[in-house]
Image (tube, rainbow, N blue to C red):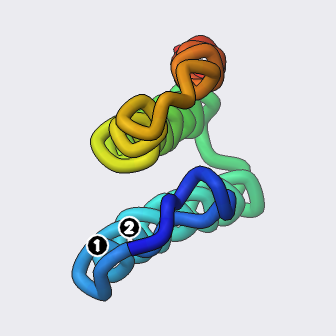
Amino acid sequence: MPNCCHYKSTPRSPETLRQLQNRLNRIIGQLGGISKMLDENRYCGDILTQVAAVESALQSFGYTVLQEHMETCVVEGVRAGDTEILDEALGLIKKLK
């Protein structure tokens, strides 16, 4: 298995890809629902509730990808002596806060 971070790509199993795509597709569906709510001039509070749900789902998605990154790319990088990958990981964690 090639070092995923050296090539800046991560080989994922078909099952992992399917799960990530399913989660992302649900988020896209939620965004479409918000767009429809706007078209229907729905109550602001209802729209904001859906915005909060999308933000939460997207953050959860990001943390799932981050966990995968930490368990694969970061571990492989450290094992190969690349300690700079830890700085990259910290930067990514800050972006997701």
The answer to whether residue 66 is above or below residue 17 is above
Asked whether the beta carbons under mark 1 and mark 2 sit within 8 Å of each other, the answer is yes
- Which element carries disc 1, helix, strand or loop? helix
| Dot label at residue 20 | 2
Q: Nearer the viewer, mark 1 or mark 2?
A: 1
- Count of number-bearing discs: 2
Q: Residues within 10 Å of mark 2 (few under 14, many from 20)?
A: some
Residue depicted at x 45% and y 39%: 80
Q: Between marks 1 and 2, how big is the CA–CA gap?
A: 6 Å
Q: Is residue 46 visible?
A: no
Residue depicted at x 38% and y 74%: 1
Q: Position of residue 2 (x, y in %)?
A: 48, 70
In depth, the one of 47 and 88 nearer the eye is 88
The kind of residue on which mark 1 rests is Thr
Q: Is residue 53 left or right of residue 90?
A: left
**Which residue is denoted by mark 1 in the rendering?**
16
Q: Is residue 76 left or right of residue 52?
A: left
